[in-house]
Image (tube, rainbow, N blue to C red):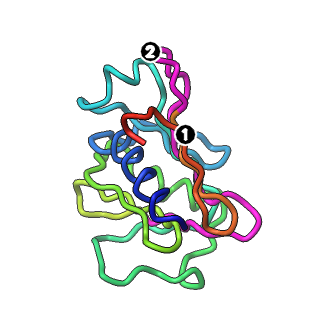
Amino acid sequence: MNKEDKLSAERLLKYICIGATVEGLSFYGPKLLLTESEGNSERLGDGQIYITIDSEFTLLQSKTDSLPSFSDLPKLNATDACKILCELRLKKIIEVSLQEEIPHLLLTFETGEVLFISGHHDMYESWQAGVYFDEVQANHWEIVACPGGELAIWGPDDIV
């Protein structure tokens, strides 16, 4: 993963996610739906912030120095995955980060829990985050963990 892409993606992720709370779940994906925060609500307007999870993930009870390896991640069916994600309802995101070499996404909640989303797959996108229906400035807000561990990023120039 390109270091410059990682930094740009983290800036955009932090802008759209920090201070947001999990307000819903779309079942095709699954996709977390987030509220806007005080820091981004004016700029995002009526846009819907989302994070689509297309890879393995786990909910860690707290931050840890060692992250799970791919083989340690649970292979969840759709029902069990949604149950875990529903437990995040109304929890506020206070920190967002990407790992150095592979774009594993970590969302830290005010409860101390950390949602770890694997950022690597050889053939498919692992996760996507962005904003639907940004009518205020019609910007394209999106970060995609691409096959092979690369990132694709679209966002306003002053953030990206």
Q: Which residues are magenta?
A: 116-140
Q: Secondary structure at mark 1?
A: strand
Which x, y percent locates residue 42? 31, 20
In this rendering, the answer to whether 13 lies above or below 58 is above
Disc 1: which residue = 154
Q: Residues within 10 Å of mark 1 (few under 14, many from 20)?
A: some
Please state if 109 lies on the left or on the right of 88 as rendered. Answer: left
* Extreme residue in the top direction: 136
| Amino acid bearing label 1 | Trp
Q: Nearer the viewer, residue 126 or 146?
A: 146
**Among numbered discs 1 and 2, the one appearing first in the sequence:** 2
Q: Quadrant of residue 119?
A: bottom right
Residue 129 on the magenta span: yes
Please state if 138 lies on the left or on the right of 39 as rendered. Answer: right
Disc 2: which residue = 136
Which x, y percent locates residue 106? 40, 62
**Residue drawn at point x = 42 percent, y = 66 percent:** 59
**Residue drawn at point x = 34 percent, y = 47 percent:** 14
Q: Quadrant of the N terminus?
A: bottom right
Please state if 35 lies on the left or on the right of 126 as rendered. Answer: left
